[in-house]
Amino acid sequence: MKRKAVVLYLGGGEDAVFQPLLGRPLGAYALEAACRLDPDAVLVLADTGADVRDGWENLIKGVETKTPIFLLAGKKRKAGRREGLLTALGTARAVLEKYPDCDVLVVPAGLPLLRDRTLKALLRVHAAKDSSLTFMSGGGEAGLTGILALRSADAFPLLRGISPTRAAAGFESLALRLTKAGRKVGFTECLEPEEVLPVEKGVNIGRTAGRLRERKNDALARRGVMFLDPASAWVDWAAEIGPRTVVYPFVVIEGPSKIGADGRIYPHVHIMSSTLGARVKVLSSTVMEDTVLEDDAQVGPFSRFRPKTRVCSGAKVGNFVEMKNTVFGPRSKAQHLSYIGDSWVEEDVNVGAGTITCNYDGVSKSPTRIGAGAFIGSGTELVAPVKVGRGAYIAAGSTITKDVAAGALAIARARQVEKPGWILERVRDRKKAGRSHRS
């Protein structure tokens, strides 16, 4: 009968486990690799303290798995001190006793490059050699990795009567006890040493992030995403990109963003927690957060989309246009130098260059609504709250403070006054004044 497997995941508040790395806590990577083994349980041993516990609970929620995960609070430790192996086993013993005949796989939290296949290889060697304890080394001068497998039925009797608060002897102590008891202790080498590269307190963060980035981009490329320069594109772990979408150099895609098929993401684009439909074009140097671009929309270059913005199907938003908390209707256009905030723009609207929705009066925000087919002339100021009716025209340079009826032409600017010969008279008067002053 095959023995059960339980993973003891060694975390700690003083480690870098909560450091964000490609959009998720660093400690989530090794935890996810452990869960992929489909063990009977995963025991996460972490420090006490409400802030640390909240961090671990959020980290665990971010790992998709059906494996039961138990968060066990260890004793508060001083910064820089690791939990000894025997101490960790003692703390987890109450739960581990529910699995009297199991292989306990011990995994440190600070190994984000660790893969589940490496852990499976360790368990295979452990079972094939019928060992009570199997260490994994990093090869060469790397030494032990902190990853090991042990048989609970052999190890636990040796822990009886040992106080967890004093049992910080570590790997060698446990190996010695098992050897004296006539049990087998073995070693296996990790075939890819970079997987056991530890990350603590910011050390190796850049190198590790680069390798994770390569893995993510490779996985997307296998699904049909075309990276023109994968070494310069940063895509968060949770982000999704559809097939045949082309990602140009120096693109950053953060959070649980979703990008549809057949799109184009041009250089220096920064996308945060946004959803893009199929065949979307995002031209260079565009920034967006919590934004939705529907199918066939085109935005940029140099556009900015702040949270709660939706650009509907077929719409175009051009250079130096900023939107915030706005629905921009199907096939509508705002091509140049405009700010549209707290607005609802219906379909087929043309927004001229330099248009501003004046949505903030210094105290509160007010909405602007523009009806279908309306034409907003260049240099218009729409002072909210205000509504522009369907098919209405706003003359260029107008300041609109009242609602405009459907199909109407609104002109709200000062009457042009022209004084013929004024400049010649002004120059002549200045010359006379200059001669009088010199005399």
Image (cartoon, rainbow, N blue to C red):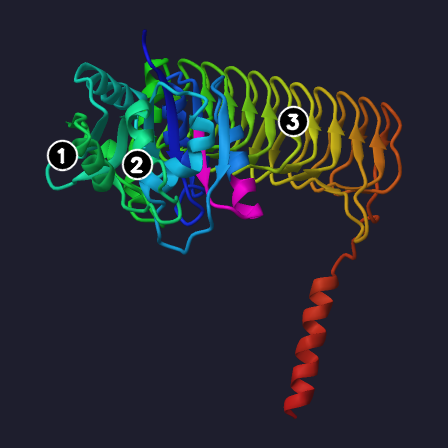
Q: Which mark is residue 310?
A: 3
Front one among 25 and 415: 25
Give the image location of residue 72, x and y in percent. 49, 36
Task: State the quadrant of the C terminus.
Answer: bottom right
Q: Is residue 265 visible?
A: no
Q: Nearer the viewer, mark 2 or mark 1?
A: 1
Question: Mark 3: which amino acid?
Answer: Arg
Q: Earlier in the sequence, mark 2 or mark 3?
A: 2
How far is disc 2 from disc 3 in space, using C-alphas?
Answer: 32 Å
Give the image location of residue 292, x and y in percent. 60, 25
Give the image location of residue 147, x and y in percent. 27, 32
To which residue does mark 2 refer? 210
Q: Which mark is residue 139?
A: 1
Labels 2 and 3 touching (C-beta < 8 A): no
Q: Which mark is residue 106?
A: none
Task: State the quadrant of the N terminus.
Answer: top left
Q: Is residue 424 above or below residue 239?
A: below
The residue shown at (40%, 18%) is 39
Labels 3 and 1 touching (C-beta < 8 A): no
Magenta segment: does it hold 46? yes
Give the image location of residue 349, x and y in percent. 71, 24
Q: Which residues are magenta?
A: 43-55
On the picture, is 336 further left or further right than 7?
Answer: right
Q: Nearer the viewer, mark 3 or mark 1?
A: 1
